[in-house]
Image (cartoon, coloured by chain):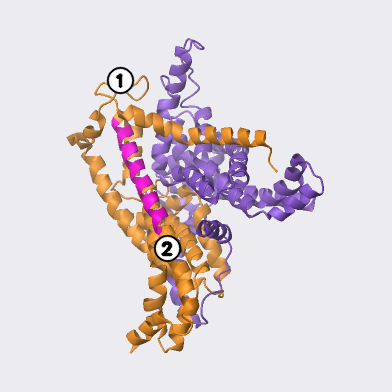
Chain colours: A orange, B purple
Amino acid sequence: MVSRRTKWLLGIFFGLFTLFLYGPMLAMAVLSLQGPFGSQTFPARGLVSGHWYSELFADSLQGVRDATGVSIRLSLIVAAITALLSMSLGMAFRRRFRGSGILFYGILLSLMTPGILISLGLSLLSYYVGLDTGIYTTALGVQVVWALPFGFLVMTAVFNRYDARAEEAARDLGASSIVTFREVTLPIVWTGVFGAGLFGFTLAWNEFERTFLVAGPTQTLPLEIFRITSASVLRPYVYSLGVLTTLFSFVLIAVFMLVSRASQRRAESAAVKADEAAALPDAAVAAAAAGD
Amino acid sequence: MEAAEAMLGDATMSGAVLATTGPRRSGWVTLGWAGPGALWLLVFLIAPVTMIVLASFWTKTNTGFDAFKWTFSNYGRLFDTVVYREVLVDTLKNAFIVLVLCLLIAYPVAYFLAVCIKSIRLQIALFIVVLAPFWTAYVIRIIAWYPILGRQGAINYGLEKLGIISAPLDFLLFSNFAVVLALVQLYVLFMVTPIFFQLATIDQSAVEAARDLGASPYKVFREVILPLSLPGVLIGCIFVFVLVMGEFATVQIIGGNQIQSVGTIVRSYYTNIDLPAAAAGSSILVAVMMIGVAVLLRFAKLREAV
């Protein structure tokens, strides 16, 4: 349907597009490998050297390292909360309920609201109620709001493929709903829950605009990078820092992809099992046993 | 292979609330599952946005505002100088330019991915390549333009070496050009994704039917594929428009202090502890966004009618 020539043209366009997406990052990577006399722009001086990577451990950059620590801790907490809330919302949305439409739009709204509005609004709110903004309170709050729609999407996808017959069987055999959830549902969907958490971690790790006005006195890594950029002339260690955080993000995506594939397989094999085991649902038997 | 196909299908549908796989249950159980998430959104999303609108009508004090002392003076302060109005218009203009550029770039990219690539595996791999930058630090992605656009950046350096220019081009960095370029690169993914999913769901039998009836490839595109992909285009447009209108970090970092947006103005009111004016500036922004989205929706309706 598409002519060969059109296909080629579109392919070339796609290639240029990829260059547009990744080119700046590649230039940054090259410049991060300069020697001690390197500057923020071309020509690159003293390639190839790890100077600006070891510079990250200099005393003057203690702030960067502190911010990295804060970011890791905060992102872990965001990941855990996102995973829990996404799973719980995913369970809720398995059936229609009163207010499900409104809640769905709420989740959509958290994806669509520009960061500065949330950030400013929450900062005003905390001024109004007289509480200070802080990393583990307000910043945590907005980062979860940002991660939640993505985690929710992951869980919706998981539950759409989920075969409820295993649950029914467990219940028929007398397992309570708590036991059914713990012994049947959770083992099938936990990889999805983990994926939702991982998504949350990555988004929190890179979040900037929402956190900007509500982080209190502490800096996260993106905030610290922004502070450095606006306070002084850019030195190549910002590039090496950028390369490292980007690589870290890519590793996280790769893990996420692996996990979501595993979760898919799991859901499918669970469905197959439920098919085969109509006579003797072993998961259900186990559940009933655990319930006794 | 099948799994991948199913995943793509899922991702397309998961925008809709359609799961009915759950067991019957009491309202309390539903509340238990939905409650925590709903509460979180209420506290950290709905309340803050409501707060902006309220505070924009409250009286300014030296440290913040006096709650429930109603006034319109914050809006007056905003419009005393022409700056806010001008910047609002500039921001709208930029949002429009970015929107159009994103559309022009994203559509062929999504079309190539969804229609020209037949292997699902390759399709997913390329889609991930396109999507991956979204998961990387936004601030870093903006800074990464410095070595490309700077006075001695890759472009100027290359052009000078080739003898095309004798002095570096200044308009490349800290300019509106740079801001638009960076914004397109940041937000084009929000356009590619919905268009791609929409194109991927198009029923191939409709395309084949059109072809069997003798339609030319161009005609098939214009009469079948394009109309069917419009919902995706619309979602992409809404996303890009709203997010670009609210931008401030990109403008700040790559526009130097030369370029302003509503976001940077709001930020500077905030830094000068004029919180109600910051709130007023944001409220207007929200109103403009809602009007913009309404216009986009209206436009889509018109298209449907035609």
x, y percentage for residue A87? 43, 67
Q: Quadrant of residue A282?
A: bottom left
- Tell me where residue B189 appears, x and y as whole percent: 53, 44
In-front residue for pair A112/B5: B5
Tell me residue B269's x, y (percent).
Answer: 44, 42
**From the viewer's perspective, is the residue at label 2 or at label 1 nearer?**
2
Q: Is disc 2 in the same subunit as disc 1? A: yes
Q: Chain of mark 1?
A: A
Is residue B288 magenta-colored? no
Residue type at tag 2: Ser
Q: Which mark is residue A45?
A: 1
**Looking at the picture, does residue B157 appear above or below residue A171?**
above
The residue range painted magenta reads: A237-259
Q: Residue furthest left?
A: A59
Compared to residue B109, the image places residue A38 above or below, namely above
**Residue flagged by tag 1: what amino acid is it?**
Arg
Which type of secondary structure does the marked residue at label 2 adopt?
A: helix
The tag earlier along the polypeptide, 2 or 1, is 1
A246 falls in the magenta region: yes
Coordinates of residue B86 in the picture (x, y in percent):
58, 34
Q: Nearer the viewer, residue B147 or B227?
A: B227
Secondary element at image label 1: loop
Give neighbour class at mark 1: few <14, some 14-19, many 20+ (Cα, 10 Å): some
Q: Does the image show residue B128?
A: yes
Dominant secondary-structure state across the stretch colored magenta: helix
Give the residue at x 49% y 60%: A153
Report the residue at 46% width, 13% height from top: B160
Q: Which mark is residue A263?
A: 2
Identify the chain of the residue marked 2, using the numbered disc in the image. A
